[in-house]
Amino acid sequence: MIEVKGLSKHFNVPIKVSGLSATIKHFFNRQYRRVDAVKALDFSIKEGEFVGFLGANGAGKTTTLKMLTGLIHPSGGSVNINGHTPFDRKKEFLQDITLVMGQKQQLIWDLPAMDSLRINAAVYEISKGDFDERIEELASMLELKDKLTSPVRKLSLGERMKAEFMAALLHRPRLLFLDEPTLGLDINAQSAVRRFLKDYNTRHNATVILTSHYMADITTLCERVLIIHEGGLVHDGVLSELIENFAPFRQVKVELGSDVDKETLSKYGEVESLNGAEARLTVRRDELTEVVSKLLSEQNVLDLTVTDPPIEEIIGRVFQKGSVS
């Protein structure tokens, strides 16, 4: 479905120095510096895959999505999406894709959502029969049937986001680019959007690329993740591989029969927290079996749990280090 080879994008940014003379000089003899937003990306995505696309702010995620959707031209490399070059913006390509950005809206603020949906149906030349069928399907999946006749401005943020999804998916695209689709939503609305996206992916075998700062979105929906750091791809694989490769520690939560001091626990691992008889330790994976055995034999352990570090922490380490090796 998607084949990306050597994709790159740089921008020439004006160099501005403060002061009147510098401003005048800048006006007549402008100097630029080059900013490499995306650097030689290589990856491929199969039809029906649900892929997470992660990176810190400014890593190049949105720039990449804009190149994949044909909104901006690359500085180098190539993109092939289902036989199309995005930058040609051919009708067949545009009917196959959609881009949903959590901070942008396409619905007309003062009109009912249904009116905006009818406009989209006209743009995509959707017949009345198909329109009615798809509205019924999407409204049912999103639990939004009773809200489509209300002005958009009267909908809650979660309801507006659901209506935005209806508008974006009305033409039934095979490829979804989602840029922070749950941004600003409460927990219930986030869960509803995740369920809908998973259902849509399953029903229509849609290919989905998702960027999100909410790790629950990624862990719930994506088996595979691409991580971009300073414009370059630093990881392409399943989440479990990322955890194995970049989390050499495990977290051990232990509850003892009586209060214990930090010095006593420190011989088992790094003490992250201690509250009376409850503690959380960080232990190297290769030492885990030995440490747990010592804890059970030397301390009065009432409860013990071993877990991986939170995925947010693991991703954060990748961003800081810029590598998973």
Image (cartoon, rainbow, N blue to C red):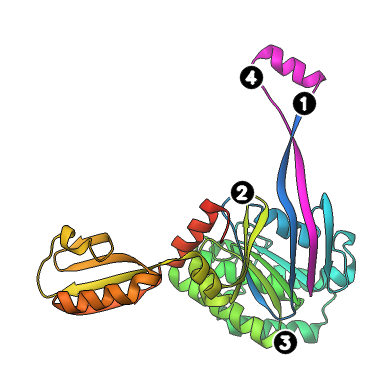
Vertical position of residue 320 compared to residue 107: above or below: above
Q: Which of marks 3 and 1 is nearer the N terminus?
A: 1
Relative placement, left or right, of 8 versus 151 is right
User: What kind of element bears circle 1?
Assistant: loop
Q: Determine which residue is flagged by label 4.
A: 18
Name the amino acid type tagged 4. Answer: Ser
Q: How crowded is mark 3: few (under 14 residues within 10 Å), some or many (20 or more)?
A: few
Q: Give the range drawn in magenta.
A: 1-30
User: What kind of element bears circle 4?
Assistant: loop
Relative placement, left or right, of 163 versus 294 is right
The residue lying toward the viewer, choosing from 69 and 41, is 41
Q: Distance between the residues labelled 2 and 1?
A: 23 Å
User: What kind of element bears circle 3?
Assistant: helix
The C terminus lies in which quarter of the figure?
bottom right
Q: Earlier in the sequence, mark 2 or mark 3?
A: 2
Kindly report which numbered mark, 3 or 1, lies closer to the viewer in this rendering. 1
Residue drawn at 80 percent across, 74 percent down = 96
Kindly report which numbered mark, 4 or 2, lies closer to the viewer in this rendering. 2
Q: Which of marks 4 and 1 is nearer the N terminus?
A: 4
Kindly report which numbered mark, 4 or 3, lies closer to the viewer in this rendering. 4
Q: Determine which residue is flagged by label 2.
A: 58
Residue 23: % across, % down:
71, 18
Residue 307: % across, % down:
37, 74
Q: Which of marks 4 and 2 is nearer the N terminus?
A: 4
Q: Determine which residue is flagged by label 3.
A: 133
Name the amino acid type tagged 3. Answer: Glu
Report if the CB atoms under discs 2 and 1 are less than 8 Å apart: no
Q: Distance between the residues labelled 4 and 2?
A: 25 Å
Q: Residues within 10 Å of mark 2 (few under 14, many from 20)?
A: few
